[in-house]
């Protein structure tokens, strides 16, 4: 699976802790991330992470484009709901694309743990992920 990792500044440490905890599962998948988050995750865990640009510089949009092309299977996006984000429209657009293309999205630790454990149980293997189909209108 292709899994995108995104975290606002105050949530990066939480995402790194999640990836460390579940590295034994995530190491079997391709990890993608926005720039700063990806660099920090790779340094902290030793896992390979393909880094896009940082979120405010277009990384959220790059991941959104990958969703639209059918190249992302899951997104773990640790959002900081208490701090205004200058690129909030990009965040909203990415979340919308996840809904349009039925991409599993978790925005906090609890939801992320459920999705990762679902990978471990093989729940996504039974699901046919074909994101290249046109979304319903």
Image (tube, grey):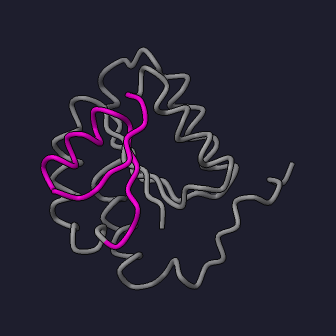
Q: Is residue 44 shown to the viewer in this render?
A: yes
- Pick the front one: 82 or 119: 119
Q: Is residue 61 left or right of residue 44?
A: right
Residue, x 21% and y 31% (percent of image)? 10
Q: Is residue 34 magenta?
A: yes
Residue 127 spot, x, y in % from top left: 61, 78
Residue 90 spot, x, y in % from top left: 54, 26
Q: Is residue 30 left or right of residue 66?
A: left
Q: Is residue 46 magenta?
A: yes
Which quadrant would residue 35 be assigned to in this image? top left
Q: Is residue 69 left or right of residue 3?
A: right
Q: Is residue 88 left or right of residue 9?
A: right
Q: Looking at the image, how many numbered discs can be counted on the residues?
A: 0
Residue, x 59% and y 46% (percent of image)? 66
Among all residues in the image, which is located at the extreme right? Answer: 137
Residue, x 30% and y 65% (percent of image)? 113
Q: Is residue 36 above or below residue 49?
A: above
Residue 41 spot, x, y in % from top left: 22, 47
- The stretch in magenta equals 28-54
Residue 58 spot, x, y in % from top left: 49, 25
Q: Is residue 20 above or below residue 16?
A: below
């Amino acid at each position: 699976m292709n899994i995108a990792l995104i975290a606002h500044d105050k949530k990066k440490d939480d995402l790194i802790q999640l990836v460390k905890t579940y590295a034994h599962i995530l190491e079997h998948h391709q990890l993608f991330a926005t720039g700063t988050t990806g660099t920090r995750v790779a340094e902290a865990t030793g896992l390979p992470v393909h880094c896009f640009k940082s979120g405010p510089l277009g990384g959220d949009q790059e991941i959104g484009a990958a969703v639209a092309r059918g190249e992302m299977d899951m997104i773990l996006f640790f959002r900081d709901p208490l701090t205004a984000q200058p690129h909030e429209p990009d965040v909203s657009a990415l979340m919308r694309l996840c809904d349009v293309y039925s991409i599993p999205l978790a925005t906090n630790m609890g939801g992320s743990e459920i999705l990762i454990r679902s990978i471990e149980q093989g729940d996504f293997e039974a699901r046919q992920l074909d994101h290249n189909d046109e979304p319903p209108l």
